[in-house]
Image (tube, grey):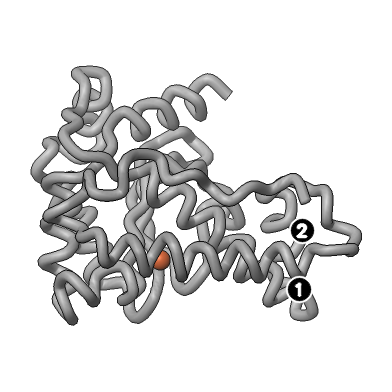
Amino acid sequence: MKIDFLAFPYEKNKLSPFISDETISFHYDKHHRAYFDNLSTLLKGGELENKSLKEVILVSYNIQELKALYNNAAQVFNHDFYWKSLAPNIKPSVYVLGFIDKYFQSLDTFKENLKKKALTQFGSGWVWVVLNKDKELEIISTSNADNPLVLDFAPILTIDVWEHAYYIDYRNSRVDYLSAVIDNLINWDFFEENLKKYLVD
Ligand SMILES: [Fe+2]
């Protein structure tokens, strides 16, 4: 298999106190790892064994017999993207702020919209900042394992809103988890890197 398990992108205690070591030990070491191990088992010896993660997701999307493969592959992609979307102590650059102002008027409005979209995602899922086909910035949410790749959007940033992302630290309070993450842990460097990557493509 060509796909690797993501090495955690920073020291695991760096997201504390907003996301605790205990949450990471369950979320990354158990949930994320289980999706990866399931994917590895499902791909073994099959036609898609040597495809990239994105290819596996796109090929298996909406195919009933490949539902388990799709769910595990998409959840591996989503979690890889989530951990990279978080980091402590990073401020948005003037370039990023200019982009945000253009589509959301201000950073505060952007944060409010992101939080609102994440709160109104019913049940398990993800909130995403994406570029649409016209390369305009948008906020969308997806259910369960779905992600922007299958909806023809370019992913820029994501936040996991499955309960396992916040239940240990915030119990049932998705809003407190979102406030902590949005105000303190957005990896604006990753945001900028993705913006530039997809705007050039
Ligand atoms: Fe998760």
The residue positioned 21% from the left and 58% from the top of the image is 19
| Label 2: few (<14), some (14–19) or many (≥20) C-alpha neighbours in 10 Å | some
Give how far across and how far down residue 54 sits, in percent: 66, 48
Question: In which image quadrant can residue 120 be found?
Answer: bottom left
Give how far across and how far down residue 163 sits, in percent: 31, 76
Disc nearer the start of the sequence (2/1)? 2
The kind of residue on which mark 2 rests is Val
Circle 1: element type: helix
The residue positioned 22% from the left and 44% from the top of the image is 14
Left or right, 48 with respect to 36, comes to right
Left or right, 132 with respect to 58, comes to left
Query: For mark 1, what is the residue?
Result: 66
Left or right, 132 with respect to 95, comes to right
Disc ID at residue 186 = none
The kind of residue on which mark 1 rests is Leu
Is disc 2 in contact with disc 1, using a CB cutoff of under 8 Å? yes
Left or right, 115 with respect to 55, comes to left
Foreground: 25 or 2? 25
Circle 2: element type: helix
The residue positioned 24% from the left and 70% from the top of the image is 166
Find out if the beta carbon at label 2 lies less than 8 Å from the nearest ligand 1 atom. no
Query: For mark 2, what is the residue?
Result: 59
Vertically, is 152 above or below 106? below
Q: Which quadrant of the frame does ligand 1 lie within?
A: bottom left
Give how far across and how far down residue 147 sits, in percent: 51, 58
Foreground: 169 or 92? 169
Give how far across and how far down residue 193 sits, in percent: 41, 26
* Distance between the alpha carbons at the discs numbered 2 and 1: 9 Å
